[in-house]
């Protein structure tokens, strides 16, 4: 029970890594506050957790809006008395095209969803964690934010995911004395909706990894559990790679 009686916010929780993390964290004793845009899927997730004797609540919203970050923190406080940790996982890839061909709207959308939302999250999550005497905040970056590996058309995505690494490093410096740790998690190719459902594409992505396969969402959730739990009590400002070796192969 690595998160026993801890209250954790999880965004992007309606599917993929976020949903897997919610199920895992609840099984590890956490009170989970799950957020995403798709309310019906959030309701199903909460029902599944409760059916397994876990504790969960949800609220749907748009992470691009600061008010939604506030709402998630307020829900954690009203339902469970405070906030101990957050897995800020929601994100999009956006359109893939070379920068000269990229529409400004795509750039702004990707940065807003992947990076500006993390600013809003930290702005409101950290004061709540300080009220509890400390906590752990985690952002889902990507190996693309660490070493692009020559992947084309990923300029906006790579910039946003690199930005998360810098944000976490700054937060770790600013709030370490408050007992708050800040880290990023860098997955490789993972079988989520973002990867699509074309077997040929999955096979291509798998071959890029030295392990010759893509990750299951549950495997990335296990890495997130480590970074949010006391098992990583001396880890902060870290960009933890959980990418099946793809960044080494492509570097």
Image (spheres, rainbow, N blue to C red):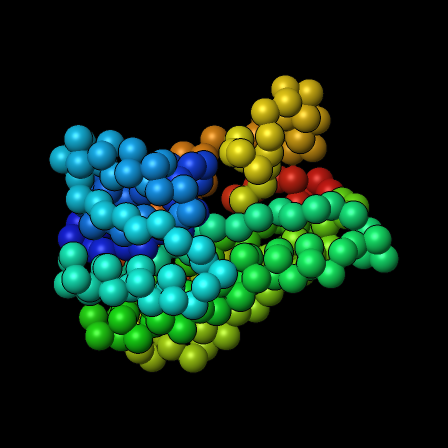
Front one among 181 and 30:
30
Above/below status of 47 relative to 29 = above
Front one among 239 and 231:
239
Q: Quadrant of residue 159?
A: bottom right
| Residue name at image x 49 percent, y 61 percent | 64
Tell whether 122 sits left or right of 82: right
Above/below status of 95 relative to 112 = above
| Residue name at image x 36 percent, y 36 percent | 41
| Residue name at image x 48 percent, y 69 percent | 119
Residue 83 is situated, as x and y percent measured from the top left of the image, at 24, 63
Exactly how many numbered labels are in the figure? Answer: 0
Residue 221 is situated, as x and y percent measured from the top left of the image, at 40, 41
Q: Quadrant of residue 177?
A: bottom left
The reply to whether residue 30 is in sight is no
Front one among 136 and 56:
56
| Residue name at image x 69 percent, y 20 percent | 200
Tell whether 31 sits left or right of 125: left
Above/below status of 211 relative to 111 = above
Residue 243 is situated, as x and y percent measured from the top left of the image, at 57, 41
Tell whether 91 sits left or right of 144: left
Residue at the extreme top of the image, as rendered: 199
Residue 63 is situated, as x and y percent measured from the top left of the image, at 45, 58
Q: Quarter holding the N terminus?
A: top left
């Amino acid at each position: 029970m690595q998160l026993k009686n801890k209250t954790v916010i999880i965004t992007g929780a309606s599917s993929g890594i976020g949903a897997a993390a919610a199920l895992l964290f609840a099984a590890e004793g956490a009170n989970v506050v799950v957020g995403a845009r798709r309310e019906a899927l959030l309701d199903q997730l909460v029902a599944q957790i409760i059916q397994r004797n876990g504790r969960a609540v949800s609220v749907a919203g748009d992470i691009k809006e600061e008010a939604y970050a506030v709402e998630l923190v307020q829900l954690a406080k009203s339902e469970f008395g405070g906030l101990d940790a957050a897995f800020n996982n929601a994100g999009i890839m956006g359109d893939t095209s070379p920068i000269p061909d990229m529409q400004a709207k795509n750039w702004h959308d990707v940065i807003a969803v992947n990076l500006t939302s993390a600013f809003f999250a930290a702005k409101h999550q950290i004061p709540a964690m300080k009220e509890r005497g400390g906590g752990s905040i985690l952002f889902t970056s990507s190996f693309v934010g660490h070493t692009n590996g020559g992947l084309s058309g990923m300029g906006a995505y790579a910039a946003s995911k690199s930005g998360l690494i810098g944000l976490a490093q700054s937060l770790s410096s600013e709030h370490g004395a408050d007992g708050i740790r800040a880290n990023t998690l860098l997955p490789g190719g993972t079988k989520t909706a973002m990867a699509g459902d074309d077997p040929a594409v999955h096979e291509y992505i798998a071959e890029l990894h030295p392990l010759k396969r893509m990750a299951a969402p549950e495997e990335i959730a296990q890495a997130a559990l480590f970074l949010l739990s006391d098992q990583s009590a001396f880890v902060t400002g870290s960009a933890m790679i959980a990418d099946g070796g793809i960044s080494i192969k492509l570097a």
